[in-house]
Amino acid sequence: MTTLLPSALDTPAELEPHHAEVVRATLPVIAENIDDITKTFYRRMFGAHPELLANVFNRGNQAQGAQQRALAASIATFATHLVDPALPHPRALLSRIGHKHASLGVVAEQYPVVHEHLFAAIVEVLGADVVTAEIAAAWDRVYWLMADTLIGLERELYQGVGVAPGDVFRTAVVVDRVDDPSGVVTFVVESTDPKRPFADFLPGQYVSVGTVLPDGARQLRQYSLVTAPGSGRLAFAVRPVEATDTQPAGEVSTFLTGTIGVGDVLDVTLPFGDLTIDTAATHPLVLISAGIGITPMIGILEYLAAATPGREVLAVHADRTTDTHPLRAVQEDLVESLPNATLELWYEQPTPGAHTGTLALSALSLPEDAQIYLCGGAGFLQAARAQLTAAGVPDERVHFELFTPNDWLLA
């Protein structure tokens, strides 16, 4: 990666022995009831603070239960590590959460709100007779060890971009809109205040975009940057999410692509994200994507074309057809502009010049020392990682991102 992990992640959190004993003994009952606990937590917190659901939390993820599962899994994973330090340190979990929190402007003062309603939910679900003072004290310690680590990481991320904690939003005007044949729309924005410009960023990072929907709610979504740093402008690509049998239509993506044009104003944050390449390195890169997972790869290719065009790159993309391939012409042009880059495509329907079917990395010759980046749906990532493991690629050379609250679970 481009930088070492922040110091907040370099000092492992530890439970006192008496707390560790209690947590170890009660972890099974907490884990067994964690889904009910997190559902109760969000119900209580949004009941007391409805503005959080309207203006901060992703209503789509809440409706589908994705956010609840993310919180449940993160707490259980962190607690499990605390009682068994021999397990891998949850750095990927904490780093990914910290970057997302920074992109939402989360500050230390919000953690006590979460604590209040989370522990009230634990008591409500398990019962006051079960949650003794000793048990409450041990799990309180788990919460604050995790919270303090995240607060420290987020403080360092804010310092890294030179802002006060939480001061990440900029009022941005749309200066260009590019409609791709796939239905994806790229928005180019710049800050309306020259004194509060966008910070520079690393290839592969993202921004949070906020807009006020017709019902008055200010919803936030995160989108990867698809341009090279250095211009002072940011470009991000949005694919409208259509309704299916299992999920509603994406309310923010539909609103942005259907409503927002040049001259409109959005809230856009400074860039964050830990799926970034080492810009000082010279080893080969393998960029593997599917669907809208192409967006961080486009940002990386844009950087390479502008800064280090001679680097060896293998770009791989899988999609249903050429028509559904987001930013296809952009990707092809960028790879064509790089003298040591190759593009390999997989489409489900037979297409001249492309492989047919699902991704099969065994058909490719992967550079032995390449750093490999993956982005796409959960099934695609799991299949690609399994293929890389079967090919003997070490885990430390594989980096990935999934656009859901639980992406770190694939680590």
Image: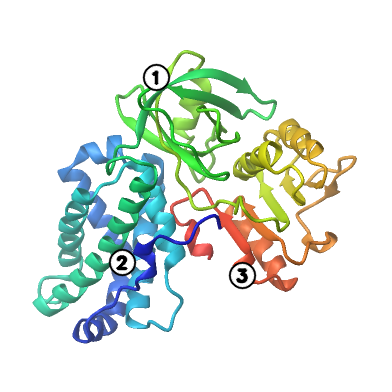
Question: Split into 4 quadrants, where in the image is the N terminus?
Answer: bottom right
User: Which is more toward the observer, 102 or 281?
Assistant: 281
**Label placed on residue 395:** 3
Question: Disc 2 marks which residue?
Answer: 34
Q: Residues within 10 Å of mark 3 (few under 14, many from 20)?
A: few
User: Which is more toward the observer, 300 or 47?
Assistant: 300
For residue 292, say whether it is visible: yes
Q: CA distance from mark 1 to mark 2?
A: 44 Å
User: Which is more toward the observer, 204 or 116?
Assistant: 204
**Residue sitting farthest toward the top:** 263
Q: Is 323 situated above or below 153?
A: above
Q: Is 221 situated above or below 42?
A: above
Determine the image quadrant of residue 333: top right
Residue at 25%, 47% (x, y): give it.
107
Residue at 61%, 40% (x, y): give it.
299
Q: CA distance from mark 1 to mark 3?
A: 43 Å
For residue 62, say whether it is visible: no
Closest to the camera, between mark 1 and mark 3, is 1
Question: Disc 1 marks which residue?
Answer: 192
Residue type marked 1: Thr
Dot 2: element: helix
Dot 3: element: helix
User: Which is more toward the observer, 123 or 279?
Assistant: 279
Q: How many marks?
A: 3
Q: CA distance from mark 3 to mark 2?
A: 29 Å
